[in-house]
Image (cartoon, coloured by chain):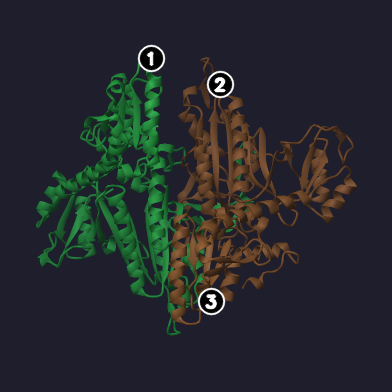
Chain colours: A green, B brown
Amino acid sequence: MAKELTSRNEDYSAWYNELVKKADLAEHSDVKGCMVIKPYGYSIWEKMQQALDKMFKDTGHSNAYFPLFVPKHLFEAEEQNAEGFAKECAIVTHYRLKADPQNKGKLIVDPDAQLDEELVVRPTSEAIIWSTYKKWIQSYRDLPILVNQWANVVRWEMRTRLFLRTTEFLWQEGHTAHATANEAVKETTQMLDVYAEFAENFMALPVVKGRKSEGEKFPGAIDTYCIEAMMQDGKALQAGTSHFLGQNFAKAFNVQFTNRDGKLDYVWGTSWGVSTRLMGALIMAHSDDDGLVLPPKLAPIHVVIVPIFKTEDELNKISDKVQEISSELRKQGYTVKFDNRDTHKPGFKFAEWELKGVPVRLAIGPRDMENGTVEVARRDTKEKQVMKLDEVAAQIPKLLDDIQSNIYQRALKFKGEVTTQVDTYADFKKVLDEKGGFISAHWDGTKETEAAIKEETKATIRCIPLDAKEEAGVCMYSGKPSTRRVLFARAY
Amino acid sequence: MAKELTSRNEDYSAWYNELVKKADLAEHSDVKGCMVIKPYGYSIWEKMQQALDKMFKDTGHSNAYFPLFVPKHLFEAEEQNAEGFAKECAIVTHYRLKADPQNKGKLIVDPDAQLDEELVVRPTSEAIIWSTYKKWIQSYRDLPILVNQWANVVRWEMRTRLFLRTTEFLWQEGHTAHATANEAVKETTQMLDVYAEFAENFMALPVVKGRKSEGEKFPGAIDTYCIEAMMQDGKALQAGTSHFLGQNFAKAFNVQFTNRDGKLDYVWGTSWGVSTRLMGALIMAHSDDDGLVLPPKLAPIHVVIVPIFKTEDELNKISDKVQEISSELRKQGYTVKFDNRDTHKPGFKFAEWELKGVPVRLAIGPRDMENGTVEVARRDTKEKQVMKLDEVAAQIPKLLDDIQSNIYQRALKFKGEVTTQVDTYADFKKVLDEKGGFISAHWDGTKETEAAIKEETKATIRCIPLDAKEEAGVCMYSGKPSTRRVLFARAY
């Protein structure tokens, strides 16, 4: 089964597409550009949701739900935002179908059921949410509002890839309102930190925190902060964004409040989101030619146990023992799968659970029963060891922690290896083509240079890293002065 | 605050609308027919989701996600289903807006971005899901498929009410596929039992389990089962449905499988759902003229503690004690809110938390501190007692259990009181107008009689109760023979 995957070296893109489908994560649907997230894939997304949701609540946020549809006049209100999303909006124009008089059993759009005003299927919810906040906010006492929404959004895409770029996707979008610019900026960076912490601690994914250039920021934002991750093929992936909206949406929707001095002022805003795109990042960062490699903290199944047996009697004896082990591991909060199918051979099962990325596999046969041992295989390094059965309950949790940490360290090492500092445009292009990865270089800060580099190399400024030091230099492209390096990469 | 609510006797409908808004549960949005679910309301929905999701998983189901949009040709495939939902569908016809050449800053639908085929925003997902199952199912080994989806759906409504009837609503929809009719029927009734258990154990809402008449069943189903609940105004509310779909969708989408005998057969299906409508049921079943009454198992806050103080020193001493109590209760899994605002008087706070339905309120002042006591008020009965501070951690959990049970018993008693058995149509109309509630009566089983009674009285057959006994009788309307009683009511 796993052997059927194209190798990463051969064709990284094909490897990714096959892996997503064969590991039962997602597939294309009958709706152009939309995916079906299959149960196994969805269970990983649920783990992400749970961890993120707890982090949002621990930082004082509550969930709420706002409408799917945005009336056109609200959508238009913040001009930059409207302009940024207008080209990729699904539009509802009618509210009824009727029987087709020409074709029995077929339906047509009822021309008598045309809406007075078109509805935009939300590509993001700033417009509908700020038009609501207007009703909620009168005074500084009503602030801050710290709200998050788990929802589906639609951005019409011509070229789609499962998880990475789909017309409909699932995400969370936080939308907060504050009395001061300072407080809103703090919220923006706090949520960036939450995302970075989630990526590193749960996804085992090291990220660079940074600020987007003017050309790459969110339409309607003053500043966009992001976390950028590195995939195994040397391309970067934007894994989450947090926007300081200033008073832009408050002004567009006339959301004013009486401040502590009794004066009327516009409210300050932020918004921040991560999406099912994270699934793509998770897959591409860690997996190998045999299939998924999942960090234990996001694995739907932590341990799979495969019995090696010839007779039913052997299976029964093994089952009793497995029952004990499973129950001890489950008590500690781990999910254990006992694969006792008699329709498939152990080798097939090994390959299948490798493909699905289960972090630890136990194999146990009659000889193990005699010796009181079990064979333990870890997915990340493929290393095997023999463990005493009565140590399993104590050792497996440690092993899972070690796997979580190893996957992270491996990704961190890789990221370090493919991050290169260059000073000339010639070197830049060379590194980009030969090695890829993050390239740290001086840039003159202009849109023109950014656009020219993108046009010539397909590399974009991923971010201006938050930890970038002041450093006098010259732009590798224009030769104009620059005060700090930025991070370039080709990206998903 | 609470005093501002219209009383239930005066105007039940106004009471409901005001309560939903004033308790911060939901409000109308700027999108016709769509609501905003506010953080406090959403936190109750989250509690419902958690409990239901666990019950679904405990019965072997997994979550997945299918597209929001249904291409028209798939929507049409199952004719009854298509006909049933065609009149209330939001239709996407275009995928782009562009600048309005006539009006600077405005947008218009781009006529060059018309879709080749219209997309229906899902009113329910049988069509898109069965078109997917076709790809997943070849053999009996691929069955059963036990999948659930948490999602938003859209059914265009002309007359809407918060939670009860909105154009967009949130729900879960289970969609299962089976190798035999028997297994599918078992799944249908199992999920009905899950819903009934959830309603009774979590919502404290007694329900009648039954089967819908032909006229009231789900478009495309062979049989629809439901749970019906009784509201305080004597009107019924359908709280959940579970459909046996037979092979209808399998035939419409040509989903066949090789059975154990090696023969090709159509797959058997079920679907089942509950929605944010349950929020309406929860509110209307238990709440009173002072506000919400929440069963502890769904209450976002279990205990609110209000300090009675004049000086900061008094507040500090109380806070220390409250810290202790809260920490002990939190350890046991309860959510405790310490309302130490110095901007509002205790009386205002009492009314506010009553309005929001917090099951238990503790009030503690300097004299309580001296005596080592606290005043405990329960929301359901308004009874107050003085409790020793050192007994709070042990007694409050018992009190919460008692409140949960009392709310259920009260609703059960009420349901019993407003369930009436009648034998003549004259009595039926009299009971309906004077008392409302469930009316158990003989019916001849015809659509015509059902329609005539509905036309004349606005009462519908809520269900044919599963526990209805065989009983010879005559239809109260037509005088024709009948073998069992059915349950009528006016309904939401």
Q: Position of residue A139 (x, y in %)?
A: 48, 77
Residue toward you, A345 or B179: A345
Q: Position of residue B137 (x, y in %)?
A: 48, 27
Residue at the spot of label 3:
B367
> Given this view, does label 3 or label 1 mark the residue nearer the observer?
3
Horizontal relation, residue B179 to residue B224: left or right: left
Q: Do labels 1 and 2 touch, CB within 8 Å? A: no
SS at mark 3?
helix
Mark 2 belongs to which amino acid?
Asp
Task: Tell me the number on the disc at residue B320.
Answer: none
User: What amino acid type is highlighted by mark number 1?
Assistant: Thr
Q: Earlier in the sequence, mark 3 or mark 2?
A: 2
Whole-angstrom CA distance, mark 3 to mark 2, is 77 Å
Q: In the rendered image, which residue does mark 2 sit on?
A: B265
Mark number displayed over residue A311 = 1
Amino acid type at image mark 3 = Arg
Q: CA distance from mark 1 to mark 2?
A: 34 Å
Q: Nearer the viewer, mark 3 or mark 2?
A: 3
Q: Which quadrant of the figure contains the N terminus of chain A?
A: top left
Q: Residue at x 53, y 34 (%)?
A: B130
